Amino acid sequence: MKHKWSLIGTALLGLLLLSVGAAGAEMHVALGEDVEGWDPATVIFYAAGEIVRNCYDSLITYEILDAEDSPAGVAMFDESRPKGMLAESWEVSPDGKEYTFYLRQDVVFASGNEFTSEDVRWTVERSMNIPGGTGWLWDVIGVSSMDQVEVIDDHTIRFVLDEPNTLFLPSLQLEVMAIVDSAELKKHVTEDDPYAHNWMYTNVAPTGPFHVAEYVPGSRIVLEANPNYYGGEPKTQRVVYHIVPSEATRIMLLEAGDVDVSLFISPEEVQRRLVDRPGIDVVSVATPGTEYLAINTTLPPFDDVLVRRAIAHAVNYDELMEEVMHGFASPATSPVPALTPGHKDVFHYEHDPEKARELLEEAGYPDGIQVELSYRLDNPVEEAVAIYLQDQFAEAGIDLVIDRVAASRFERIRVTREYQMALIYWTPYVNDPVYQLSFNYHSRSECCNYGEYHNPTVNSLVDQATRETDPDKQQELIDELQEIIADDVPIVYLYHPDRITCMRSEVEGFVYNSAHFLLYRYMYKD
């Protein structure tokens, strides 16, 4: 779904000191949160992930579907058609265990260093060895040891898997798999920091079209075009992110034309202030991302599946989508989203307060329960969701205590799972059912198993699905997994929110991707 709507800003706000560059050469973006921690090996924050995607390239990427051919009505990545990025091409052995990548020979880092196979090898090594890094992800996709990474020559590298792995190739396009400048980083290593993670937290060693030219914590970050970029300099030479915590201010800046893009505007405000107004385009795209209630299944009373089912019956899903999302959402009915291949409609928990009370009584809680729900304080949509859930849960005998958490603290408790329940938005950066099931429900997932779900049968089935190369047999495993997980309810799926991007109508080149990052290598002002 695509909507294009607008508004004329009748006066300049003067609320922020925003410099405006040459027409089309500079882009200004209003963010609602600070930008920090953009080491690709450990990146967590959304905005930091966007910095990584704009400053680094990975081995592969995807072909782009034009708006005319796209099911979303906008240009978007076609995840069925991978193509080379830093890898010019690749070969896969007949048994599916060996991937040989032939690297581009015209790539120069922003530092001026030449890109070689050693940069790929060292990128894998550092991500495996940095605390909190993506070593676990390499293990998931079949690379558990550096012995499996073979440098053939300066521009050829081979990965040797123990067994076929359907997640290996698509995962290489993730921002956490971005290739770094090993020669530059080695200048910043110390005895206590052998992979220069501390330096990389607020610096970049990029292969991509931009580099970080300035960072003022809590205020702004400036990206400038990389003059050495092998793909040619982008039309946008400078991107300035402004940290604007107030949603109302982000809207006013967009209305006045003081910024070109404003992110994290709630559906209510989009509908109320930005629909059908000249000068601003609102692009709304249905996505496989899911807003859900993560239930810490290791804590009582949530370790009882009857309690989790009661919570699922306490939610008024239709009301949430209508009153909170104002139609910018679709129903979520499975561990595998409707827009992900292999989806099966299995989550049949309708709003039924009486059924919820019966389940609580059966679980030994005839007088109901009190539970705490944590969410990010700077997220206006989740604020509205929490308030709605509080009223709905009361009907079901559940006293919902709302825990409003500052963004920095929320990231900590999300990683450590220090919550009873939490509102989480998760999107599959690889729109693949096995990727989704592996990240969200396998015990080994250090990233996204936010329900702390541990089911040996699910672990085994996910492992089998990851190895299975026969599409029909793999789908049988995916179907079984969806049914088991829906029955166990480690997560309560609320809805699939549309991705809403609000920008001035002169901004062109928007390309939707499943990570929702704005990609300024394509975007520019007309």
Image (spheres, rainbow, N blue to C red):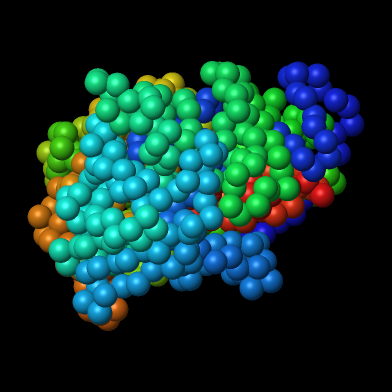
Q: How many marks?
A: 0
Q: Residue at x 83, y 36 (%)?
A: 22
Furthest toward the front, the residue is 153
Furthest toward the left, the residue is 456
- Say which of 198 and 497 sits in front: 198
Relative side of 36 to 520, left or right: left
- Say which of 287 and 438 sits in front: 438
Q: Residue at x 49, y 49 (%)?
A: 57
- Say which of 349 and 376 sits in front: 376
Residue 9 in the image: x percent, y percent?
A: 85, 34
Relative side of 433 to 181, left or right: left
Q: Is residue 442 above or below residue 16?
A: below
Residue 157 in the image: x percent, y percent?
A: 32, 59
Residue 406 in the image: x percent, y percent?
A: 43, 21
**Can the viewer see residue 82 in this picture?**
yes
Q: Is residue 279 above or below residue 406?
A: below
Residue 407 in the image: x percent, y percent?
A: 44, 25
**Can the viewer see residue 451 in this picture?**
no
Q: Residue at x 85, y 25 (%)?
A: 12
Q: Is residue 185 above or below residue 179?
A: above
Quadrant location, the N terminus: bottom right
Q: Is residue 193 above or below residue 299?
A: above
- Say which of 17 and 187 sits in front: 187
Q: Residue at x 33, y 58 (%)?
A: 153
To which quarter of the image does residue 212 belong? top right
